């Protein structure tokens, strides 16, 4: 029995499965590396694992900061994440979930929240948004820097954030 020669390292990648068959004597009898096939329900499980369930409508939490920085290591908050004036991290609402139409197809999910400056007359500069799995602490899933520069909001002004994630 010859072994499958692997010229790449698929271990740890979501789209590869390593299968090994051992005999009763412990000798390796067969090894193969195959591409997995994620189903449409698998995609829904993926989306629900990341962003909550379809039923509860809470699908992720959006946090904001005016400080532009690249996170390193385990991140549970943005640097100088804003927690006042209506800009505190909050649960977003699922807008759209589009299931894949074929095996291994891409799903998309949109999450949305509208922030409104409710503080004093002080203007607040916002330059980054983070997508988290919890309102407090949690894990930073994705990060977006406002590419046209910071948004400076005065009292009563609003900022809509719609996050589209494909998986």
Image (cartoon, rainbow, N blue to C red):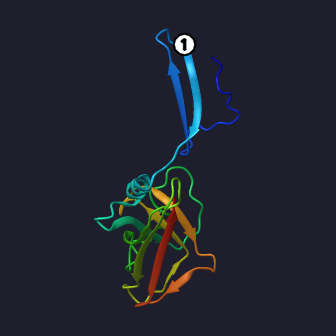
Residue occupying the point 46% across, 83% down: 159
Q: Report if residue 79 is visible in the image.
A: no
Where does the image place residue 40, in percent across and percent down from the top left? 44, 56
Quadrant where the image shows the N terminus: top right
Q: Is residue 72 above or below residue 151?
A: above
Answer with left or right where residue 40 lies relative to residue 35: left
Which residue appears farthest toward the top when viewing the image?
Answer: 25
Residue at 68% over, 28% down: 5
Q: Which image quadrant is residue 60 in?
A: bottom left
| Residue assigned mark 1 | 27
Total labels: the figure holds 1
Q: Kindly give the residue lying farthest to the left in the view shown.
A: 56
Say few, some or many: other residues with alpha carbon within 10 Å of mark 1 (under 14 / 14 to 19 / 20 or more). few
Query: Which residue is found at the position 48% from the left and 50% from the top?
Result: 38
33, 148: nearer the viewer: 33
In the figure, 139 relative to 97: above or below?
above
Residue 6 placement, left or right of 98: right
User: Is 123 in front, or is 88?
Assistant: 88
Q: Position of residue 150 (x, y in %)?
A: 58, 80
Residue 55 in the image: state x and y as whole percent: 28, 65
User: In the figure, 166 relative to 121: above or below?
Assistant: above
Q: Is residue 24 visible?
A: yes
Q: Residue furthest right?
A: 7
Give the percent coordinates (x, y) of residue 49. 39, 54
Instruction: Kindly state the secondary structure of the residue where label 1 is placed.
Output: loop
The residue at the point 45 percent across, 52 percent down is 39
């Amino acid at each position: 029995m010859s072994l499958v020669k692997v010229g790449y390292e698929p271990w740890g990648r979501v789209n590869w499965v390593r299968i090994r068959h051992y005999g009763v004597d412990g000798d390796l009898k067969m090894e193969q590396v195959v591409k997995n096939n994620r189903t449409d329900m698998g995609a829904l499980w993926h989306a629900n694992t990341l962003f909550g369930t379809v039923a509860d409508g809470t699908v992720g939490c959006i946090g904001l900061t005016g400080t532009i920085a690249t996170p390193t290591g385990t991140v549970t908050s943005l640097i100088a994440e804003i927690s006042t004036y209506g800009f505190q991290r909050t649960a977003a609402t699922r807008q759209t979930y589009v299931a894949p139409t074929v095996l291994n197809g891409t799903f998309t999910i949109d999450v949305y929240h509208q922030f409104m400056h409710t503080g004093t007359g002080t203007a607040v500069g916002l330059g980054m948004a983070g997508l988290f799995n919890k309102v407090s602490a949690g894990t930073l899933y994705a990060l977006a820097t406002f590419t046209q520069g910071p948004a400076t909001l005065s009292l009563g002004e609003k900022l809509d954030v719609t996050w589209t994630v494909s998986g």
